[in-house]
């Protein structure tokens, strides 16, 4: 960012729904115990991870994969870190003496993914969880992204929250890397998708988001911003959230 600001021109940014899901497969131990998943989620301060990785721009993640910029986003109560509560849940799940885990990350969209995993590691220490980070080549990660029981997967921007939820969290869909399956969630998502009115859809999304958040299938700390530098000679440039180059309203200044 410092180098970009030193260049002639201006740094512009765009909010996006691009994100990192540090997700757990609910069918594999120890993540088949919801107490373990909830302990991991409760141990984490998403806002602090965002501040470390993307201090400027972007949006906070709430562990349900719907971004604030999605038109149907419903604002749930703010998540709060609860270290003592996380410790109690771990003890109830049989891990009173701690737990050792490994997360796979491929930096498929850049080294910021590894940085987020390192921030997660540092926070989990406070509840007695030792997190090892297995950094893989991007091509190798994409070979196992839907198989690893704990992985950090980058998801790109999609214009609607319902789109990504249908792709990634419906029971049995090919991209459901968490193996999460809930008839209640599927029905709630059906209900949200069945209406065109955005205000009515937002009301129905409250239940959708809450069900997925309560299932504790992932730590999703933020939705990242993107940036570019625009020359002083260029006018009308706007950054697209998926970095598409759209120049229909761009001109060169005389």
Image (spheres, rainbow, N blue to C red):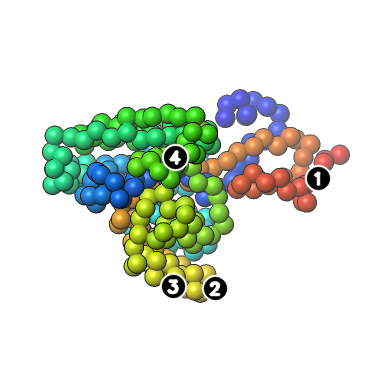
Q: Is residue 171 above or below residue 203?
A: above
Give the SS element for disc 4.
helix
Q: Earlier in the sequence, mark 3 or mark 2?
A: 3
Kindly report which numbered mark, 3 or 1, lies closer to the viewer in this rendering. Answer: 3
Q: Which residue is mark 1?
A: 251
Kindly report which numbered mark, 2 or 4, lies closer to the viewer in this rendering. Answer: 4
Q: Earlier in the sequence, mark 1 or mark 2?
A: 2
Say the numbered circle drawn on residue 191: 3
Crowding at dot 1, Cα within 10 Å, few <14 / some 14-19 / many 20+, comes out as few
Q: Position of residue 163 (x, y in %)?
A: 52, 60
Q: CA distance from mark 3 to mark 1?
A: 44 Å
Q: Earlier in the sequence, mark 2 or mark 4?
A: 4
Q: Earlier in the sequence, mark 3 or mark 4?
A: 4
Say the numbered circle drawn on residue 144: 4
Dots 1, 2 in contact, CB < 8 A: no
Q: Is residue 144 left or right of residue 252?
A: left
Say the numbered circle drawn on residue 196: 2
């Amino acid at each position: 960012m410092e180098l970009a600001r030193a260049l002639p021109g201006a740094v512009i940014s765009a909010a996006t729904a691009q994100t990192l899901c540090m997700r757990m497969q609910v069918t594999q131990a120890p993540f088949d115990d919801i107490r373990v998943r909830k302990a991991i989620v409760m141990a984490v301060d998403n806002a602090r991870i965002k501040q470390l990785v993307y201090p400027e721009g972007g949006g906070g993640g709430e562990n349900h994969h719907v971004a604030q910029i999605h038109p149907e986003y419903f604002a749930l109560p703010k998540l709060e870190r609860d270290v003592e509560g996380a410790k109690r849940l771990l003890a109830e799940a049989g891990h009173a003496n701690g737990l050792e885990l490994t997360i796979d990350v491929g930096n498929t969209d850049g080294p910021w993914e590894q940085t987020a995993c390192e921030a997660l590691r540092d926070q989990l220490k406070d509840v007695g969880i030792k997190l090892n980070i297995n950094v893989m080549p991007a091509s190798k990660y994409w070979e196992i992204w839907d198989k690893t029981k704990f992985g950090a997967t980058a998801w790109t921007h999609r214009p609607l929250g319902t789109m990504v939820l249908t792709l990634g969290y419906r029971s049995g869909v090919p991209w459901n890397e968490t193996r999460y399956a809930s008839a209640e969630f599927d029905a709630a998502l059906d209900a949200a998708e069945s209406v065109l009115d955005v205000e009515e859809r937002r009301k129905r999304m409250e239940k959708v988001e809450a069900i997925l958040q309560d299932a504790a299938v992932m730590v999703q700390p933020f939705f990242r911003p993107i940036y570019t530098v625009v020359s002083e000679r260029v006018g009308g440039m706007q950054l697209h959230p998926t970095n598409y180059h759209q120049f229909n309203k761009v001109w060169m200044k005389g």
